[in-house]
């Protein structure tokens, strides 16, 4: 299959994958949990992004009345450029862009492992399409989808090649992903790898500069966080976070369960076809002693197992009590955000190895193509089909029609009011141009929380469930 046919294959995938938004528009479904319900955090007010690059009193104080403007800046992300015109179509455009980048990243990363073998490019394309068929967590943008491209950039630094494109890739990732979704965990892994390379005397200046560019990019893109924590030293709600853990046996069950499933914010859908094919291929390679990348394969397996162990142990009650006492304000168990990319990189390498050792290449091509197509289908079932059929539709969730009926009945301009929201998310009122008392926010001044508690404490005391 030549490049034009591969391009056509990719185009057909994108047309099918995003067909709900093209055919149904705002009547299609967009995930609510940890997504639409926190639109206010993305600076969405009156239907589009109306935040600011720098803290200013001109930024609409749609939520959290009285807090410093620095808390309304949020992250400097490329996504906000698209949200400036319309949230809905900005969302769709962001989803398309991160999948184009995700496809190119995994495709060219796996080409390294293909090397000079006869493994067809169209199979690489199918594996890469299977990866981007995943319903990536929307507010994370490139955090998950961009990991293959990020890994490719650092590999190029190691090989001292394609440096300009690699530095651009690093900058793109820093300004189009989230430090607290994947960035911190990427940093931890880089430290481990760099220590190893330093011992082996293989650490070069481009690897060092690349890491510095990534770090500085995150500092700039998340500058409001660094100012709040390290310059203004404003205590936030994060220091008061406290979680309830599990006993030993429940922790053990969670470790095993996590290995075979995936977190809702980092869906990998690996249990159905990837795990079932990867395990026998790995054992087959070991038994036959025909392998080229066994060391890397075992490292990737080890990481996936370790991430599940970390996830389970983190919530083991004795350990969680220590973490609660430290008041870190950050959940360090979230290495699982890297898992989708790791699963697909591992799977891609194993399928290439399988192709190389099979004598009947035609049979190998059929097996790999069928596996990839099945994985694509499963991904689309949980994304495209859901967008077509699930409820509530986006336009029902944001309730523009209802708010359009409310506005004429107001005695003043809607921006003059600050409303309380009972039975629906504050972001819905914000989306329709109303300021709210409440907010879905993961990062705000501790003082605001304490003041708000004093207002509602009697109500809380009278509710046994709360």
Image (cartoon, grey):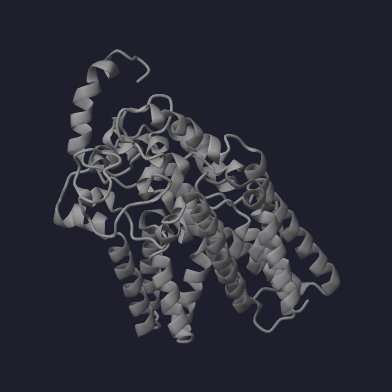
Q: Horizontal and vertical percent for residue 120? A: 74, 76
Q: Horizontal and vertical percent for residue 195? A: 35, 72
| Above or below, 138 relative to 156 | above
The answer, for residue 46, to whether it is visible in the render is: yes
Q: Horizontal and vertical percent for residue 36? A: 46, 42
| Above or below, 73 relative to 206 | above
The answer, for residue 288, to whether it is visible in the render is: no
Q: Residue furthest top?
A: 462
287 to the left or right of 238: right
- Of 178 and 77, the residue lying toward us: 77
Determine which quarter of the picture holds residue 118. bottom right
Q: Horizontal and vertical percent for residue 75? A: 33, 56
| Above or below, 80 relative to 33 | below
Residue at image position (50%, 34%) is: 401
Determine which quarter of the picture holds residue 80. bottom left
- Of 196 and 414, the residue lying toward us: 414
214 to the left or right of 143: left
Q: Residue furthest bottom?
A: 161
């Amino acid at each position: 299959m030549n490049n034009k046919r591969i391009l056509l294959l990719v185009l057909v995938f994108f047309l099918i994958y995003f067909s709900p938004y093209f055919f149904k528009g705002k009547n299609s479904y967009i995930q609510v949990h940890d997504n639409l319900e926190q639109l206010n955090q993305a600076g969405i007010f009156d239907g589009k992004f109306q935040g600011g690059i720098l803290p200013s009193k001109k930024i609409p104080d749609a939520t959290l009345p009285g807090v410093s403007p620095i808390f309304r800046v949020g992250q400097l992300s490329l996504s906000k450029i698209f949200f400036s015109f319309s949230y809905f179509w900005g969302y769709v455009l962001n989803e398309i862009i991160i999948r184009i980048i995700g496809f190119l990243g995994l495709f060219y990363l796996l080409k390294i492992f293909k090397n000079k073998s006869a493994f067809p490019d169209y199979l690489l394309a199918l594996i890469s399409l299977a990866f981007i068929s995943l319903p990536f967590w929307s507010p994370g943008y490139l955090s998950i989808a961009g990991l293959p491209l990020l890994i490719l950039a650092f590999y190029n630094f190691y090989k001292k090649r394609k440096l300009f494109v690699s530095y651009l890739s690093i900058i793109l990732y820093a300004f189009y992903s989230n430090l607290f979704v994947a960035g911190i965990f990427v940093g931890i892994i880089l430290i481990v790898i760099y220590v190893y390379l330093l011992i082996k005397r293989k650490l070069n200046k481009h690897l060092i500069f690349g890491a510095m560019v990534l770090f500085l990019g995150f500092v700039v893109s998340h500058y409001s966080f660094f100012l709040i924590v390290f310059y203004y030293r404003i205590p936030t709600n994060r220091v008061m976070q406290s979680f309830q853990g599990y006993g030993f046996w429940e922790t053990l069950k969670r470790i095993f369960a996590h290995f075979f499933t995936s977190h809702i914010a980092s869906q990998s859908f690996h249990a159905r076809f990837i795990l079932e094919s990867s395990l026998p291929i790995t054992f087959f390679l070991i038994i036959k002693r025909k392998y080229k990348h066994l060391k890397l394969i075992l490292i990737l397996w080890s990481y996936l197992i370790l991430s599940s162990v970390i996830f389970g142990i983190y919530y083991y009650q004795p350990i969680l009590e220590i973490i609660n006492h430290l008041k870190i304000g950050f959940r360090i168990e979230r290495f699982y955000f890297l898992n989708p990319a790791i699963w697909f990189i591992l799977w891609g390498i194993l399928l290439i190895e399988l192709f190389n050792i099979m004598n009947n290449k035609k049979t190998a091509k059929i097996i790999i193509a069928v596996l990839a197509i099945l994985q694509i289908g499963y991904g689309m079932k949980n994304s495209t089909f859901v967008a077509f059929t699930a409820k509530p539709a986006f336009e029902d969730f944001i309730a523009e029609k209802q708010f359009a009926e409310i506005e004429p009945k107001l005695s003043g301009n809607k921006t003059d009011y600050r409303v309380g929201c009972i039975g629906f998310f504050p972001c819905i009122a914000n989306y329709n141009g109303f300021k709210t008392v409440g907010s879905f926010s993961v990062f705000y001044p501790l003082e605001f929380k304490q003041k708000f508690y004093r207002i509602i404490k009697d109500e809380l005391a009278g509710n046994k469930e709360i």
